Image (cartoon, rainbow, N blue to C red):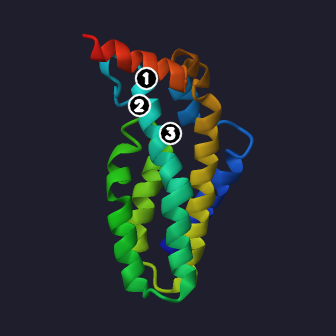
Amino acid sequence: MNQIAEFRARVQKHTDDIWVDEPKDIFLIKNGYIPSGAGRANQYFSPLVMLSGEVRALGIQIFPRLLEFARSGKFSLEQLKYMIDSMLRLDCGVIAFFGLREYGDMLVEFRKLSAEIETMEEMSGALEDMFTLTNRYQLWLFQIFPWYLSVHFPKTNRDELQKLCEAIDSI
């Protein structure tokens, strides 16, 4: 079995393992532990916000578009490899640091191994595997996010906004 096939098998197994059972990384984050120490002022909320945004973007924007590009027939394999390298570069540097070490390591490995892929079919398969894994992580992050904090950010209405503007103008 080649490196790409071995990697895909590990990604598929990990996806199956976390389908119902919470990933260890998620358990650690929701309990306030981030091995890298990320999080100013001894808190883990800001890394959780960052992770949620990055993983959501990967799951609903980056991987679906890369998979679409791979299946479209409009891009060469070399162009797709360049897109993967470019589009994942930032995320590869921060995902593990902010607490998703296992997923982050897989993302880094995928970026590296994608340069070795020899066929568009193999690339599409690897992208599909990463897309599924990413969305599973995104759903776990969604589950642990402290949405109840939103009560501290109430919406305003037009009348209240008008009163605020008038108060500011009177200063």
Q: In the image, which is nearer the foreground, mark 1 or mark 3? A: 3
Chain-order first, disc 1 or disc 3? 1
- The residue to which callout 3 is attached is 52
In this orientation, which residue lies closer to the viewer: 92 or 69? Answer: 69
The residue located at (44%, 48%) in the rendering is 104
Would residue 6 be visible to someone looking at this image? Answer: no
In this orientation, which residue lies closer to the viewer: 86 or 106? Answer: 86
Q: Residues within 10 Å of mark 3 (few under 14, many from 20)?
A: many
Circle 2: element type: helix
Chain-order first, disc 3 or disc 2? 2
Would residue 45 be visible to someone looking at this image? Answer: yes
Name the residue type under label 2: Pro
Residue 76, image x, y percentages: 43, 88
Circle 1: element type: loop
Q: Residues within 10 Å of mark 2 (few under 14, many from 20)?
A: many
Q: Quadrant of the C terminus?
A: top left
Most distant residue in the right direction: 20
Instruction: Identify whether 150 is placed above or below 134.
Output: above
In this orientation, which residue lies closer to the viewer: 142 or 28? Answer: 142
- The residue to which callout 1 is attached is 44
- Tags 1 and 3 in contact by the CB under 8 Å rule? no
- The residue to which callout 2 is attached is 47
Instruction: Identify whether 61 is placed above or below 102.
Output: below
The residue located at (51%, 28%) in the rendering is 29
Picture quarter containing residue 101?
A: top left
Left or right: 164 with respect to 20? left
Residue 87, image x, y percentages: 37, 63
**Count the marks: how many?**
3
